[in-house]
Image (cartoon, helix red, strand yellow):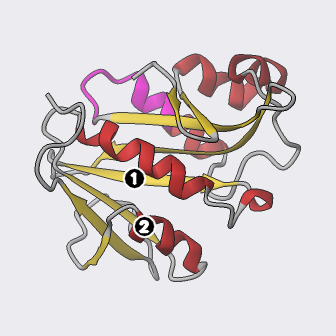
Amino acid sequence: MTIPLQTKRLTLIPATREVLAADLNDRGRFSLLLQARVPAAWPPPLMDEGVIREFLRIQDDPSGPIFAAWYWVINDPATGTGTLIGNGGILQAGGRPDTAVLGYSVLDEFWNRGYATEAVGALVPVIFSLPGITRIIATTYPNPAASIRVLEKNGFVKTEDVPAGAGAEEGTICYLREIQGPVSGRK
């Protein structure tokens, strides 16, 4: 999963080890690797140094769970430049090899513009193309409601079935999407 994904307005750039390390240690290199401006407000909510370090640890463990993440860059066709606005990715749920746990975060200044809906919509078929993955879950807080709308617009439904290690914190609710027939790109 090292090929960028393209949507109508976004480029989703894979979070390789090099990109993650630059995000952690070298903003100039990070910007260069993404070919995008990195806003001063970076990182978005929930994407702190500890999370990036954990992603690097997981990438270094070949026996670990499935992991994939992307940085989201909005493209400005008028100038040909990009701006980093968010990120999202998955981990395999502990004890549920058929289930991926989806997480995403967007800088506040880019909320309520449909970017997360667009990015998650591009990620769903890619996630379902992974060997053995037939379910995607995501947890969110009831507020802001926009996060719930992102999931619902992408075919997720509320569920009480939360696998262990799925990132469900106190006060969160869980949404699920399962494969419904053939998925584009599925092997």
Q: Position of residue 167 (x, y in %)?
A: 39, 61
Quarter of the image with the N terminus is top left
Q: Which mark is residue 15?
A: none
Q: Is residue 33 left or right of residue 170?
A: right
User: Which label sits in the foreground, 2 or 1?
Assistant: 2
Near mark 2 (Cα within 10 A), the count class, few <14, some 14-19 or many ≥20, is few
Q: Is residue 168 magenta?
A: no
Q: Decide: is 57 above or below 16.
A: below
Q: Is residue 22 left or right of residue 184?
A: right
- The magenta segment is 55-65
Q: Is residue 61 magenta?
A: yes
Q: Which amino acid, by three-letter code, is at mark 1?
A: Leu
Quarter of the image with the C terminus is top left
* Residue occupying image coordinates x 78% and y 45%: 42
Question: Real-space Cα distance between discs 2 and 1?
Answer: 15 Å
Q: Is residue 98 left or right of residue 123?
A: left
Q: Position of residue 38 (x, y in %)?
A: 81, 35
Q: Which mark is residue 102?
A: 1
Q: Is residue 97 left or right of residue 25?
A: left
Q: Which mark is residue 153?
A: 2
Which of the marked residues, 2 or 1, is nearer the chain's N terminus? 1
Say what secondary structure mark 1 lies in: strand
Q: Decide: is 183 above or below 167.
A: above
